[in-house]
Image (cartoon, rainbow, N blue to C red):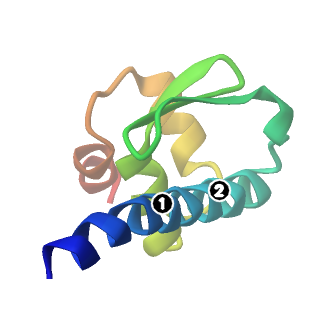
Amino acid sequence: MIICIIMAKPKLKLQYEDICMDYVEAFLNKHGLENKFVNWDIIGVSIFIDRKICSFNDIRYDIDNDLNVGIFESYLLSGSYCFENYIKSIQ
């Protein structure tokens, strides 16, 4: 059993990284951004998009909740530190 878990770990890590990239790709497409300016700080944690650092959780929240385009941009300009709280404050 332990051998199966050890062998599955690299596969799970790759699947997780693929899922994170799928979210980022959906986010970039949604917001009309190019992926040539995207660099992960830590995959699944934070990412640099067009010279701005974004939390992966914020990207996931935006995609999962199908927020209107423009909300994320106004959040970045607001200086707020929590995307979910920012969304609640503008509703």
**Badge 1: few (under 14), some or many (20 or more) residues near its Cα, within 10 Å?**
many
**Mark identifier at residue 27:** 2
Most distant residue in the left direction: 2
Image location (x, y in percent) of residue 77: 51, 24
The answer to which quarter of the image holds residue 7 is: bottom left
Q: State the image coordinates of residue 1 (x, y, percent, origin top left).
A: 14, 83
On residue 82, which mark appears? none
Q: Residue 40: percent from the left, percent from the top?
A: 56, 31
Report the side of 3 relative to 21 (left or right).
left
* Left or right: 15, with 33 as reference point: left
- Circle 2 SS class: helix
Q: Please tell me which residue is depicted at 78% across the width and 27% down the height of the picture.
A: 37
Which amino acid type corresponds to the residue marked 1 in the rendered image?
A: Asp
Label 1 and label 2: CA atoms lie apart by 8 Å
Q: Name the kind of residue labelled 2 in the image.
A: Phe
Q: Residues within 10 Å of mark 2 (few under 14, many from 20)?
A: some
- The spot of residue 25 in percent (x, y) is 71, 57
Q: Nearer the viewer, residue 34 or 6?
A: 6
Q: Quadrant of residue 80?
A: top left
Please tell me whether mark 1 sits on a helix, a strand or a loop.
Answer: helix
Total marks drawn? 2
Q: Earlier in the sequence, mark 1 or mark 2?
A: 2
| Towards the viewer: 62 or 41 | 41
Marks 1 and 2 close (CB-CB < 8 Å): yes
Residue 48 placement, left or right of 56: right
Residue underneath mark 1: 62
Q: Is residue 34 above or below residue 13?
A: above
Tell me the residue at 53%/36% (across/down): 74
Residue at x 58% of width, y 21% of height: 52
Name the residue at 68% across, 64% down: 26
In this view of the protein, which residue sits in the foreground, 26 or 76? Answer: 26
Instruction: Report the quarter where the C terminus lies.
Output: bottom left
